[in-house]
Structures are given as structure tokens and as C-alpha cells.
Image: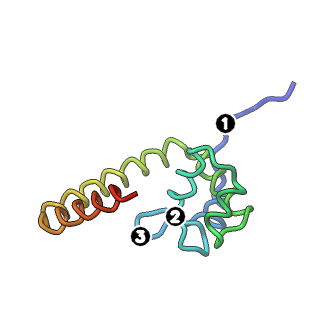
Amino acid sequence: MACVSARKPRKNLATKYVVERDGAYWIAGSRVSLDSVVYAYRAGRAPEDIVRSFPALTLEYVYAAIAFYLARQTEIDRYLDRRKAEYEAQRKAARLASPTLHSKLARARRQITSRS
């Protein structure tokens, strides 16, 4: 009977396929964030479909990014929660800084959607 043990994630997977830069995770050699791949994966999209959405990536890199996420799921989920909170704080600050602009944008958005 085979024994399955919990092992630490391999370091080389991170450095070859996923890199940390400026406080964020990126797919190595691209401008595609790990966030984008993980959100697509969580939404149930197949790796082949993810590659079609991000032509800069190969299937190998998408699978590696998913493996990286699964090996560090708790850590990456916390990172994604933190990034989402930062985004929402910046969005709120931008709305407070330029309420007239955001009011005009909302009005234009409503007009466009009412025409459809």
C-alpha cells in the first residue's frame, strides 16, 4: 500500500512558471497575472480555454500556474482576498476624489444599457 505524505511545494515550480514581482504574482515571461488564471480556473474554465483567453501563455504555463495555486491554495486565497480589498479601497477613494466624473460615467453607462 502506497503512503501519501504531505510535502512542501517545490520551489522550482514557482521560479520557472510563476514569479512574484512588485507584491503580485505573475506568470513568468508574460504580463498575465496569476490572479487572472486562478479566477478563470475557479470559474470552471478548462486550461485549454484559459490559453485561448491569454494567447501569451502556453498550455504548459497554465497547468503550472494551476498547480502552483493548488500547492499553495490557502496562501494564494489570502493573497487574492487582500488584492480584492486593496482594489475596492482604491475604487472607493477614486469615487470620493471625483464624484462628478463617476456620476457622469454612471449616467452614460445607464444610457448605453437602456439602448440595448
Disc 2 to disc 1, C-alpha distance: 27 Å
Foreground: disc 2 or disc 1: 2
Side (left or right) of 36 relative to 48: left
Residue type of the residue flagged with mark 1: Ala
| Disc 2 packing (10 Å; few <14; some 14–19; many ≥20) | some
Determine the secondary structure under disc 1. loop
Residue under pointer 2:
33
| Disc 1 packing (10 Å; few <14; some 14–19; many ≥20) | few
Instruction: Please identify the quadrant where the N terminus is shown.
Output: top right
Residue at point 25%, 61% (across, down): 90
Q: Nearer the viewer, residue 87 or 67?
A: 87
User: Which mark is first along the chain, 1 or 2?
Assistant: 1
Marks 3 & 2, CB-CB < 8 Å contact: no
- Please tell me whether residue 29 is drawn above or below residue 114 in the rendered image: below
Residue at point 65%, 71% (across, down): 55
| Disc 3 packing (10 Å; few <14; some 14–19; many ≥20) | few
Rendered image quadrant of residue 62: bottom right
Residue under pointer 3:
22
Residue type of the residue flagged with mark 2: Ser
Disc 3 to disc 1, C-alpha distance: 30 Å
Disc 3 to disc 2, C-alpha distance: 12 Å
Q: Colour scheme of this structure image?
A: rainbow
Q: Nearer the viewer, residue 59 or 73?
A: 59
Determine the secondary structure under disc 2. loop
User: Which mark is first along the chain, 2 or 3?
Assistant: 3
Q: Which mark is residue 6?
A: 1
| Residue extending farthest right | 1
Residue at point 66%, 53% (across, down): 10
Foreground: disc 3 or disc 2: 2
- Please tell me whether residue 114 is drawn above or below residue 104 in the rendered image: above
Rendered image quadrant of residue 30: bottom right
Marks 3 & 1, CB-CB < 8 Å contact: no
